């Protein structure tokens, strides 16, 4: 008999919802966490960054006060309080205690690796399990830029340890992490330069959305360089980091005080010794899973970012739901049923669901599209936050929504209304009949559908 019914490696985002169900069903669980309980989201990702987005927005609104008739003659950034607030929000002590003391759970504060397909080494112990769940997430990617080993570069975790606002933060990578942190620190008082290798920010998004997002950043004073691959970095002295890139007109060097690498993530699989269990990964190290999150080894599952099927907290949590449905025969959720949805938390944020325009075009479908700038939406004007646009894509034949982008005030919340509707596979004509609250940005969504046109 195995030591445990389930060995659960890593306290990724599905841990808090699934482990109590396992113990509730009488399963003996070994829960293993080598780093901070709560994983990236709680400690180094969503929670601390969104807390800082709120501080940055408060600073922004203080600066904009006169636009609203509220003069704030002087305001200052108290970085110690910003960081104290952020650290309070990411405090994981309650969650750690809850999981450590949960009935039915043996908690191991170690990094684990496989010894065989049913055995895992934790510290100096080898434990066995009938089922093993790998939930180990990702880490920041370090790109092989010339000189990178000789400079004090920061990743998302390191940036959250700063105790003062950087004079000049240079960010390599203009996607989620680079853009969110870029706007946060600009609003807190840093000079910020974002250097992105692709020809636009957020290379996975449509060009018009990326251009509008770039305008939001540059209008806030951020220096954005696109089509600019960083070639080398150097640090001749403390607090002086030279970043050299080719933006198309030859080599250019920007000098900053701090350097953030935000160039993507790598799955935490290398230390797991997956070969000992026979678990297959793809060429980028992500564990391959089927529709119920099972690896090629039947009793080993991989949930969350480590399987490369999602890169968000809600996708990781949803993996947990799908795993549970299969493991406990509790339901019929499948990975392939999931509709991609996410938000990017610059301010105003981008909410996205389903396909982009580029993906819709490439799908070969008969596509209808409608767009509306935020500057034509009454509630956005009342709030004097008119940056951004809405884009809606519909399949002309099935009449179902293909995808929606809401870049603008409230975009992160508004996008959620499409999730149940798209899951229900209903016609956009039904959505058109819905009555929504006035005055809201969302109330315009049914009306925007009147502008649907075939793509050029
Ligand atoms: C700066 C930043 C901001 C983000 N903001 C958002 C956001 O706003 N919204 C959103 O949806 N997503 C956001 N994300 C992404 C989000 O954090 C992840 O998608 C989410 O945490 C899901 O990861 P996971 O559940 O797969 O694992 P994780 O949360 O990464 O947890 C994995 C855990 O496994 C542990 N571990 C690894 N290897 C081992 C081992 N061998 N043995 C034992 N333990 C191990 C790690 O220490 C870690 O605690 C952000 C990410 C970053 C970096
Ligand atoms: N709001 C959210 O949900 C949120 C927020 C932050 C992070 N995340 C998650 O974190 C993950 C990582 O985000 P990320 O922004 O680090 O990675 P990313 O993979 O989204 O983007 C990395 C960017 O770096 C650029 N790049 C790579 N090498 C470069 C070089 N040498 N010079 C210049 N640019 C270079 C790439 O072209 C790309 O645009 C995402 O997958 C996302 O899911 C989510």
Image (cartoon, grey):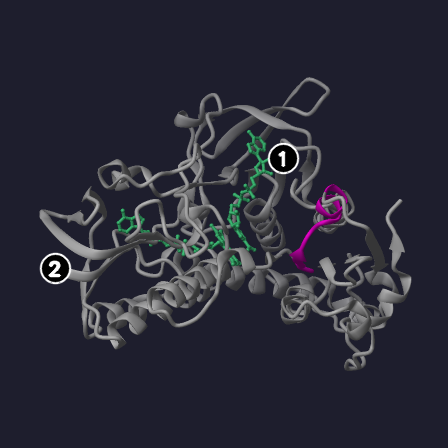
Number of marks: 2
Q: Please, what secondary structure does the residue beneath circle 2 have? A: loop
Q: Is mark 2 within 8 Å of ligand 1?
A: no
Q: Residue at x 28, y 70 (%)?
A: 22
**What range of the chain is rendered magenta?**
347-362
Residue on which the image places disc 1: 196
Mark 1 crowd level (few <14, some 14–19, many ≥20, 10 Å Cα) = many
Q: Is residue 186 visible?
A: yes
Q: Position of residue 44 (x, y in %)?
A: 42, 54
Residue 368 or residue 186, whichever sits in front = 368
Is the CB of the residue bearing disc 1 within 8 angstroms of ligand 2? yes
Task: Say whether residue 3 is left or right of residue 63.
Answer: left
Q: Which residue is mark 2?
A: 3
Measured along the vertical axis of the image, is residue 277 above or below residue 341?
A: above
Distance Cα–Cα, label 1 vs label 2: 49 Å
- Percent coordinates x, y for residue 112 in the rendering: 22, 48
User: Which quadrant of the rendered structure holds the N terminus?
Assistant: bottom left
At which x and y percent is residue 425? Answer: 68, 67
Instruction: Please tell me how crowded label 2 is: few (under 14), some (14-19), or many (20+) other residues with Cα within 10 Å.
Output: some
* Residue 157 visible somewhere in the drawing: no
């Amino acid at each position: 008999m195995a030591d445990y019914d389930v060995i659960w490696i890593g306290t990724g985002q599905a841990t808090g919802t699934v482990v109590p169900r396992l113990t509730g069903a009488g399963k003996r669980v070994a829960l293993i966490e080598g780093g901070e309980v709560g994983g990236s989201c709680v400690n180094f990702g969503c929670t601390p960054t969104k807390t800082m987005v709120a501080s940055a927005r408060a600073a922004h609104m203080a600066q904009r006060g006169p636009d609203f008739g509220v003069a704030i003659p002087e305001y200052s950034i108290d970085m110690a309080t910003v960081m104290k607030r952020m650290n309070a929000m990411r405090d994981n002590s309650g969650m750690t205690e809850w999981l450590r003391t949960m009935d039915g759970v043996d908690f191991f504060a170690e990094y684990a690796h496989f010894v065989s397909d049913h055995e895992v080494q934790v510290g100096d112990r080898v434990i066995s399990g009938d089922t093993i769940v790998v939930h180990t997430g990702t880490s920041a990617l370090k790109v092989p830029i010339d000189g990178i080993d000789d400079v004090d570069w920061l990743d998302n975790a390191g940036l959250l340890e700063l105790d003062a606002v950087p004079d000049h933060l240079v960010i390599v990578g203009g996607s989620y992490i680079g853009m969110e942190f870029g706007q946060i620190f600009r609003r807190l008082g840093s000079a910020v330069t974002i250097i992105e290798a692709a020809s636009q920010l957020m290379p996975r998004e449509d060009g018009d959305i990326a251009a509008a997002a770039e305008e939001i950043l540059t209008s806030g004073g951020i220096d954005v360089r696109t089509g600019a691959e960083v070639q080398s970095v150097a640090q001749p002295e403390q607090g002086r980091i030279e970043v050299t890139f080719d933006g198309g007109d030859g080599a250019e060097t920007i000098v900053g005080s701090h350097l953030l690498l935000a160039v993507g993530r790598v799955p935490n699989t290398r230390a797991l010794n997956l070969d000992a269990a026979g678990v297959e990964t793809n060429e980028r190290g992500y564990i391959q899973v089927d529709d119920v999150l099972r690896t090629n080894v039947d009793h080993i599952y991989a949930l969350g970012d480590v399987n490369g099927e999602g890169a968000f907290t809600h996708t990781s949590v949803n993996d947990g739901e799908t795993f549970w449905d299969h493991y406990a025969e509790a339901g019929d959720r499948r990975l392939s049923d999931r509709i991609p949805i996410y938000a990017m938390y610059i301010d105003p944020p981008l909410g996205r669901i389903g396909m982009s325009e580029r993906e819709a075009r490439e799908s070969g479908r008969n596509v209808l599209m409608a767009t509306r700038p935020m500057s034509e939406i009454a509630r956005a004007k009342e709030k004097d936050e008119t940056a951004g646009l809405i884009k809606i894509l519909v399949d002309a034949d099935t009449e179902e929504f293909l995808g929606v982008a809401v870049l603008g005030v409230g975009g992160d919340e508004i996008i959620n209304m499409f999730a149940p509707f798209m899951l229900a596979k209903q016609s956009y004509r039904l959505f058109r009949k819905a009555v929504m609250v006035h005055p809201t940005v969302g109330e315009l969504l049914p009306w925007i559908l009147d502008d649907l046109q075939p793509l050029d």
